[in-house]
Image (cartoon, helix red, strand yellow):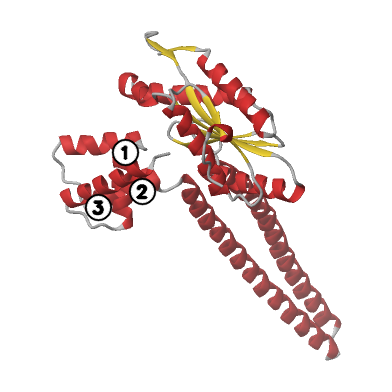
Amino acid sequence: MYNQYQLQSFLNTTLEHLKQHELHPIPENYKVWYEYTSTSTPQLNDEIDALIAQQIAISEEICHKLLKKYFVSDEQKDFDAARLAFSHLLNIMISQIANWSDSSNDFCQALEKCTTRLNNDPSISEIKDIITDLTQETLTISSASNDINSMLSSLNGEVKQLRKDLEQAGSEAVTDSLTGAANRRGLDERLQAAINEAKDKHRDLSLIMVDLDHFKTINDKFGHSTGDKVLKLVASIMKKNLRSSDFLARYGGEEFTIILPNTDLENAIKVAEHLRKAISAKQLSTGRNGQLIGRLTMSAGVTQYRLLDNAEELLDRGDNCMYEAKRTGRNSVKSDLDIVNPLR
């Protein structure tokens, strides 16, 4: 999270970038350059810096490609593909059912003709002809029935697979691909549900905001690949030290949020302290040459749900507590009890 001064600085710098590259200040371009300015997406920064180093003009078209590459969600791509696949299946079904309908109409008309011929006092020879015709029509409609049954059985399997794929896509849509923790969307959904439950059932609810100390130094010194491995390790450590009912989400960058249902402030502080010690207990080194990274520390802010809180207020209070931990030296846990004038 950023304070008001940082946000204003990002805004001013973003507008300067747009002006420098002669780009229209539309939301898409603004999104790309705001992310670049805030360094929230390191790969984007690397690509833009490479373009600038090669003296390639960053045009509207390039901005559009960067937006699609880094910010069009996999969820949207999955749902678009699923929508097209489902549309294709429906078109096949409509076509096959229309063919079945045509066959059914032909069969009904054949039956009517046979009935008419039988009513005209036919001879034995004519009756034999009617039976032959009716047998042929029956074989035709039977074949059509088998075809549509086979088609519907096949399509049923495809529909089941499509539903399975959509369920998986829905799961991935709320999961951070790097750490396996929930992403911001997953956090928003779970936090609102947790608030509703705490309010309706009069239960305790606490929240922990975690920020890894000096994480930018790791990225700068050892590279983003090492930084990604550290993030995955931190997420793994926290998951192992939380209850199954607790909820871990990557809030963004090196920040995490933990929802603690049925937990008061005192016990939430204990959880945060336990996590802080577990993370700092491990001496980190790079995988390739064993270069020492050192011990990672974290700053945490802990807050408890108050009646009539909304999700934004709860997150803001947690942020304030976390910034107090960073302001007073990092590698510590601060809570509502340590803030002189907490929000609400």
Query: Residue placed at 78% from the left, 70% from the top?
Result: 135
Question: Where's residue 174, x and y in %?
Answer: 55, 43
Left or right of 59 in this view: 72: right
Question: Where's residue 207, x and y in %?
Answer: 60, 37
Q: Does 130 sit above or below residue 197?
A: below
Q: Say which amino acid is labelled 1.
A: Leu
Q: From the image, tell me which residue sits under label 3.
A: 61
Q: Does 144 sit above or below residue 109?
A: above
In what element is the residue under mark 3?
helix
Q: Residue furthest front?
A: 340
Q: Quadrant of residue 244?
A: top right
In this rendering, the label closer to the viewer, 3 or 1: 1
Mark 1 or mark 2: whose residue is earlier in sequence = 1
Answer yes or no: is residue 242 visible: yes
Mark 2, other Cα within 10 Å: few <14 / some 14–19 / many ≥20: few
Q: Say which amino acid is labelled 2.
A: Lys
Mark 1, other Cα within 10 Å: few <14 / some 14–19 / many ≥20: many
Q: Does 36 sit above or below residue 225?
A: below
Dot label at residue 68: 2
Mark 3, other Cα within 10 Å: few <14 / some 14–19 / many ≥20: few
In what element is the residue under mark 2?
helix
Query: Residue placed at 22% from the left, 35% from the top?
Result: 49
Q: From the image, tell me which residue sits under label 1.
A: 44
Left or right of 17 in this view: 10: right
Q: Say which amino acid is labelled 3.
A: Glu
